[in-house]
Amino acid sequence: MTRTFKIGSALRRLSLAGTMLAALAAPALAQRHDLTLEERVVNINGTDRPAVTVNGQFPGPLIRLREGEEAVIRVTNRLDRESSIHWHGLILPAAMDGAPGFSPGFSQGVGPGQTFEYRFPVVQSGTYWYHAHNLDHEQRGLYAPIVIDPREPEPFRYDRDHVVQLSEWTDERPARALQNLKRDPGYYNWNRRTLVGLIRDLNRAPDADARRAIIRDRIEWGNMRMDPTDIADITGATYRYLVNGFRPETPATLLFRPGERVRLRLINSGAMTYFDVRIPGLKMTVVQADGNNIRPVVVDELRIAVAETYDVIVEPREDRQYQILAETMDRTGWARARLAPRMDAPVESLPPHRPRPVLTMADMMMNPGPTGLDRGTPRPEHDQPGHVWPSSGMDHGEMQGQPAAPAGGAHAGHQMPGAPQGQPTMDHSAMGHSAMDHAAMGHGAPPVAGAHGPGTPATTTAGGIQAHTGHGGMAMADPVVHDTGAPPGARVLSYRDLRPLRPDPEWRPYDRIIEVRLTGNMERYIWSMNGNEFWRAQPIVARYGERLRMRFINETMMNHPMHLHGMWMVPDLGNGAFNPRKHVVNVKPGTSLDVDVIVDAEGDWAFHCHLLYHMESGMMRVFRVVRDGAPVASAPRPAAQPVTALHVH
Amino acid sequence: MNAKVKASKGVAAVLLAAALASSAAWAQPGGGHGAHAASGATAADPSPAPGGGLLAPETHGIDARHPPLYFGAVLFDQNEIRSTGRGNPIYAWEGLGYYGTDYHRVWVNTRGETNRERGGLERAELQVLYSRLLGYYWDIQAGVRHDFRIDPHEGTPPRTYGVISLQGLAPGFFEVQLQGFVGGEGVFLARAAASYDLLITNRLVLQPEFEMNFSTGWDREALIAPGLYRTEVGIRLRYEITREFAPYIGYSFESFNGGATGLNRRLGEKPSQSTVVAGIRLFF
């Protein structure tokens, strides 16, 4: 009796303390984790190479958190240089974000021999991951899953839970790989178009028209000085693709009992690789995307962009093994794991690769839009030389020898049948950025529907057939539909399928638009936004509380998985309050996509392409959130302060 | 004049060394943001106080937190033995190296060949240029070219020129180089070169190339005559075992044209020769 009473009083005291803590906006319970970063030797391809491990593990250990509690994670750096851990997709104070050079008090990351204590409230649930915010350490293994258990029960049922973390490994030093790309952007592409391929295509062509189309296509690509086979910058020529650290030859085995519902948490922790994921014999029910619950959608395949996460539920009924196949988008390798009832099941063989995708002229169709402006920055910028392709993609028939388009005017004379240029030539210098409301300017060409373009897949498989697309009647690539080479009838996930369970309570029309052109130079391996690399770019300044629409215009030939730290991005897929919240939004080549940012976190945040070699080459910005009118110094202190630079011993 | 030549040679040597050392300098471990943060740390910490990131001074020009990458490359496109089928084969090279950022580079072009009879160097040319990205596909370059006099008694005399050059990729994937030279002898020279990589397979590459040299006037000692005075046409078939190492065989035809034909004849040399070549293309 007394005992019960004591417990009751203790509980009351606890709950009182809890209330006080809650009043201080700090969650009641702390979840402590200690992570030690160390360089250790791994042997993936038969030679010992230095990997970056967390607590001796490659990839790092899973961190499990609970929504509503506080996470306290102490990171000790035993490497010989600065490192960092960024909590990918987590909503937290800027100081805890772990992006060196962005996060306040974290300009150098965690120095060698130092310990940094991350402390933040966990305000969300789902599947996320953490990684070093630098190319060298992340590429060499500093990445691992985060699983956050929700406060409320999950809206779906499952019996088993497995993480499927996709990544890649190279025996080369990442800095060396980047240098290789700088010296020769096609360094890792051993699947370029060849004379032998041309002859083969011509032989296969049904008639003279088809042959002419093939020849014309070759000439057009040559005249554009672009490579249609440039699907991935780094390929299986150096990469070995991994699931949970395992090569496809010795796959990770994920156990199940027939009849169970198995939740697979797919995480793409690759530095450069898009994967097309399928499990032959099973349908996947996608229940979460980037950690957020969505209305369950049953698909056969999905393409996972770099740094995205998808949670799928599968129901293997047979007492046999199922292969989780993740084929790289450029078809130069496999990552795979297997679902098996037993650990000792024999390893099955991999299926043949699907045909390699080839970029089409539709992918090259540039979006209308003025150049040379970076709306939302304090000063308008001008494109640096070499970032804006001299021709706009449609007038490639009349390629001129003129080497450099004058800054700011590259798109002025640009013709696009069916997409009239609603934008008069603008005098950039004369326009103040604050007055720049794109929506009010009658931007005729991209309709405000968000994702533009009718529904044709961007890439066609098979070599040479795409030549028929020609120009004229060519359709613009659909910004969110992926052609994974799936057999007819198979359902492939698209962003349009991602509809949250409940309407977004914060949904409202956007306040203003800024244009984010994804630019670059494939010949030089320069990557940038709005024609400026990170090191010479102005920060993108957003006002606290606004809903900022970023109009992505991908002027390059590559996919770019755009990632914003600290805030959700909401791609406008025409679903209003049922547009999904994401932390990574993929922007396909030659397409335009409108993405709203819920600007609710003050501070400096990193905003970048999550292809690490693109980020490292300059495709990154400071995304600065300031309070309107208020002096910037009045920014609230983060709820939790770091114990900076605790020296260990 | 002599001093100038010496100076340019010295500068050239230093720059070449820098270019060659580039790989080593670049290959330092890391290269991530850690490195950038480290280099930025010398400046004032942009965020001394919590929330201080907002107080970071407005960046003008280069952001110290993430400086541009410096990198380099060396390519010996021709690194070969040439044989006419008679007499000794000669060794010839043509290569380039650069070091710098995407926009600004120190660029070195070099070429030369050995003497058929004595085995020593017959001709050697070195260009040291500043190279600047001009547009998507083009670099504009300016600098100095020096043609060395190897043998004090024979061969062409030393010459130093100022160089202006346009280099890049023309529509159709043609590597193009257009160079203009102004020399002390009062002649203006121009060189136009182009090559194309025809991929037979992804590793077997047929590379036709041509080069034409023009002059506005006579420089008899240097075997230069007005108009088109020298052409070179070649075709090489290489096999890229790696990007770095590609053995090849090929055919090369060199010829003096116009007035230069006579200048050559006077020296007792044939104004044109065709050779079979074999070599290894190096890229590192």
Image (cartoon, helix red, strand yellow):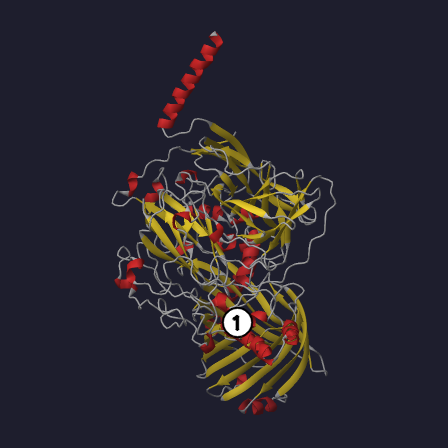
Q: Position of residue A212 (x, y in %)?
A: 57, 79
Q: From this viewpoint, is residue B102 visible?
A: yes
Q: Is residue B49 above or below residue B196?
A: above
Q: Position of residue A281 (x, y in %)?
A: 65, 49
Quarter of the picture holding the C terminus of chain B: bottom right
Q: Give whichever of B159, A291 is nearer the camera.
A: A291
Q: Give whichever of A26, B109 is nearer the camera.
A: A26
Q: Locate residue A602: give its quadrant.
A: top left
Q: Position of residue B143 (x, y in %)?
A: 45, 71
Q: Give whichever of A552, A406 is nearer the camera.
A: A552
Question: Residue placed at 51% from the left, 52% from the top?
Answer: A612
Q: Position of residue A391 (x, y in %)?
A: 43, 71
Residue placed furthest toward the top: A2
Q: Which residue is mark 1?
A: A469
Question: Residue placed at 71% from the left, 79% from the top?
Answer: B88
Q: Is residue A37 above or below residue B26?
A: above
User: Dot 1 surroundings within 10 Å: few (below 14), some, or many (20 or more)?
Assistant: some
Residue at mark 1: chain: A
Decide if residue B21 is on the left or right side of residue A151. Answer: right
Amino acid type of the residue that numbered disc 1 sits on in the rendered structure: Thr
Q: Is residue B247 above or below residue A501?
A: below
Decide if residue A61 is on the left or right side of residue B45. Answer: right
Mark 1, secondary structure of its residue: helix
Q: From this viewpoint, is residue A376 visible?
A: no
